[in-house]
Image: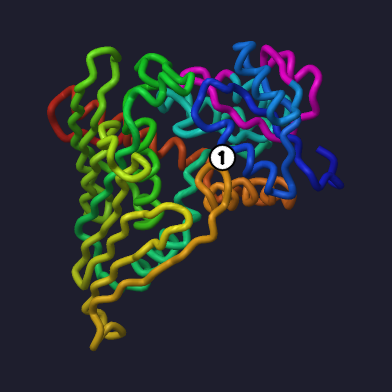
Amino acid sequence: MSGRKRVLNVGIVGLQHLHPRLYMPQFEAVPTTRVVAVSEEDTKLRTSFCDDYGVKGYSSLKEMLKVEDVDIAAIFLPHADCPEAAVRCARKGIHLMVEKPVAADVRGALRIDAAAKKAGVLFTTGYCWRMHPVAREFKRLIESGAVGTVIGAEGRCAAGRVQRYVDGHAGWMLQRGRSGGGPIYNLGVHWIDMFRWMLDDEVVEASGRNVKVNAKHDVEDNSYAHLKFSKGTILALDISYTVPDSFPNSRDLYLAVRGTKGTLSWAPAFEGEKDVLHICSDAPEYSGSPLRSVEFELTPVRGYAGCMGFDYIEGFAQAILKGGKPEISGQDAIAALKVVEAVYRSADENRWVKVRK
């Protein structure tokens, strides 16, 4: 990439996923990115996408890379296929934006990270909840000591049902060999990353259980886990594909921490609605008003994850252009997958297990 370049060419890799179309308004809105091409073997999906967004289409990644000058590869393949595509792109000097969880196992994520480092390219993934203003305030309050030493934490992420993957041309998500597993692979990694980041700590031990209610697919619909962090915090996770159809926007989200001096809780809202962070603290600065509710009203932003998605893409582009580091790194992707694998081992072995270092 030329040092004078100010707009980065993006190549979309794979369309059999729920997110590529949702990302397009973000790539269009970020002034330093421009989608120039897409590779997808399904002719119908590829043609429709190209017609809608005015980009060039290729039936394979190999063909796209032979023709196009791509700076960023945005990879939306089945998780098991992401490492091979990412390594191919890295060897071409292309920066990597691999959709979470980036691979079907830790070994695949390590392979991507090693290839990126060898090629000198940046590697990130979409743990963009860190960019949410409430999440940043949540982290600041923990670091300020407002809740004291964090003893316990809770995270709930229930989003949609398994049928949405079938309807969205992403049926592979329900095949364990291609996706890695169920909702904790696809959704739980968001909250694992969030609590790692907010607590500035790593999970060292896990206890997990998986519950399957669907009869058609070989992944579970619900994952439950208790995670122990190195500083002693215990996090309880409830991750699911079985949120009721009647639930607003088909998402049930919640995060909370409880410490020796207080609590923080947040049920993330939707763009255009008010987010409320609830604070209860015995810290001196809260004397006279220990219970507080802080409201955040976000301006709606079109595209995946709204303002968080915009900041995620813009931040990655700026890291490339200015020679910096992405806020979310390959190491973050690897750390989350190590925890997920520990949860699965625990469920299989019916015991607490150590997270592999």
Would you call the spot at circle 1 few (<14 residues within 10 Å), some (14-19), or many (20 or more)? Answer: many
Position of the N terminus, as image quadrant, is top right
Total numbered circles:
1
Position of the C terminus, as image quadrant, is top left
In the picture as drawn, the residue positioned furthest to the bottom comes out as: 288
Q: Is residue 327 above or below residue 9?
A: below
Q: Amino acid at mark 1?
A: Thr
Q: Is residue 211 magenta?
A: no
Q: Is residue 209 above or below residue 134?
A: above
Q: Pointer 1: what residue?
A: 124
Q: Residue at x 24, y 43 (%)?
A: 237
Q: Quarter of the image holding residue 39?
A: top right
Q: Quarter of the image holding residue 22?
A: top right
Residue 119 lies left or right of residue 133; in this view the side is right
Q: Is residue 334 above or below residue 163?
A: below
> Residue 188: where, in percent of width, then height?
34, 38
Closer-to-camera residue (338/104): 104
Task: Give the residues drawn in magenta, as a range.
Answer: 57-84
Q: Residue at x 56, y 40 (%)?
A: 124
> Residue 164: where, in percent of width, then height?
39, 26
Q: Residue at x 62, y 46 (%)?
A: 313
Q: Is residue 82 magenta?
A: yes
> Residue 246: where, in percent of width, then height?
28, 39
Q: Quarter of the image holding residue 274?
A: bottom left
Q: Is residue 110 above or below residue 169?
A: below
Residue 284 lies left or right of residue 350; in this view the side is right
In the picture as drawn, the residue positioned furthest to the left comes out as: 350
Closer-to-camera residue (116/299): 299
